[in-house]
Image: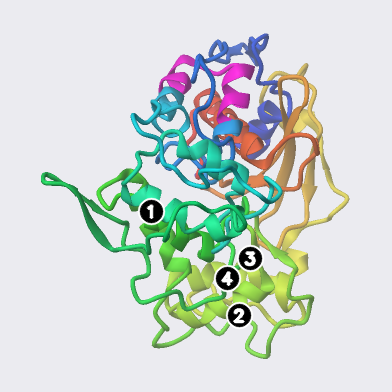
Amino acid sequence: MRPHNIIAILSILSSVTVDAQSSATNATEIPDVSPCPVCPDGLTVSGSSVIQRPEAPDGMTCDGLIEIAGAGVTQDICDEMLLAEEYCCPPAAATPCDVCADGITVDSSTSVGQGSSKTCGDLLIDSGVVEEGSEVCALMKNAEPRCCPSSNTTSPTIAPIENVTLSPTVEFQSCPVCPDGITVANETSIGGNGKTCGSLLVDAMTEPSDSVGCQLMQEEQLACCPSKATDPCPVCPDGITVESSTAVGSAGKTCADLLIDRENTEESSDTCTGMFEVAGPVCCPEVPTTSPSSSSGGNVTESDVGDEDATVSPTASPTDDSTETNVVDTPSPSSAPFLVANITYGPTTVVDVAIEDTPSPTMAFLPEPAAPATSESTRRTVFAIAATAISAMCAVSFVV
């Protein structure tokens, strides 16, 4: 027996507004929110710096953190945000890194290269919190040929070294990510938000091996240097029949990625089953999508998804009949229908979410922005906040 009616959950979800003035939905109050005092004196690193903490949404930047903190969050989330100050407003260095001593001589938006998302402008900002003579400073100076080629007074730049002793008692060890190199394209996306395998390797060079950030990077490396499967997943055996750039799911993957990922995924794995159910109907829609490990052995077809024009009436919900809902049953590559709703946060941020109608509901983030002015990292954080509130209201655990 299913523990909860998915329509009831969506009736609550579609009517929730997560902001400082929100109070009750179906007689259940959402926790109070208020601005969080993160980095009250401002950032001391570039706003594009990614926060490498386990509780931070994937790809969350310092700019995104400040934006969310100012809009208002619960106290528990604020406490977690304050832990990110070590990434976004660390104290100034006693002797700042002397990179591009005469200033940059190119446009500040010029990329530092090597797959990094940092710019030359970011380089100068970040140098203020990095000590001269440190390994991180040495890595920064490798960007001088790009950022200050005509006035570089630092000579010569120091090549990256795996292990460098900074003092008699302190040894820096960079995060060991894909030590034998990546086995996919440099531009392979890992989780969206502009992160690629190329940028992962660059970021790993300046990440301490014993940090939480390194642990997260090592989890992501599975997408960048996977070992070839003994029995590769046979999804789309004759190739894809749509554009290679066609998006699959909400994690930034494409059908081109599927062709690489299937070779590194065992046929008997749950991941392969997921590829058949989610990616197969998108990338090779006319090919039967029987999952090799499916217990029923049945095919997932468009007819399994449901009528794309079907509208769920709010009276179908066991919740308060006065609750207004606008929930639409939308076709999905999955064998179970997705029900779609919106969450608003503050005056501008809108997040689209989808919940799969299964015994163990999966709440999915839809990356297509409903409010183009809102950054994806901001919307992902709002989604996480809303999921927490909805889970408490419905007494159900979502897989986010």
Foreground tag (1 vs 3): 1
Kindly identify which residue carries mark 2: 259
Foreground tag (2 vs 1): 1
Q: To which quarter of the image does residue 316 belong?
A: top right
Badge 2 amino acid: Leu
- The coloring applied to the image is rainbow
Residue range in magenta is: 65-79
Foreground tag (4 vs 2): 2
Kindly identify which residue carries mark 4: 275
Magenta stretch: dominant SS? helix
Q: In front here: 303 or 192? A: 192
Q: Are marks 3 and 4 in contact (CB under 8 Å)?
A: yes
Badge 4 amino acid: Met
Kindly identify which residue carries mark 1: 138
Residue at 56% in and 79% down: 260
| Sequence-earlier tag: 2 or 3 | 2
Residue 278 - label:
3
Residue at 37% in and 69% down: 178
Badge 3 amino acid: Val
* Residue 232 image offset from top left, x and y in percent: 48, 85
- Is 69 one of the magenta-colored residues? yes
Whether residue 316 sits left or right of residue 378 in the image: it is right
Q: Are marks 2 and 3 in contact (CB under 8 Å)?
A: no
- Residue 71 can be seen in this image: yes
| Sequence-earlier tag: 1 or 3 | 1
State the separation of the CA atoms marked 4 and 1.
Answer: 43 Å
Residue at 73% in and 60% down: 305
Secondary element at image label 3 = helix
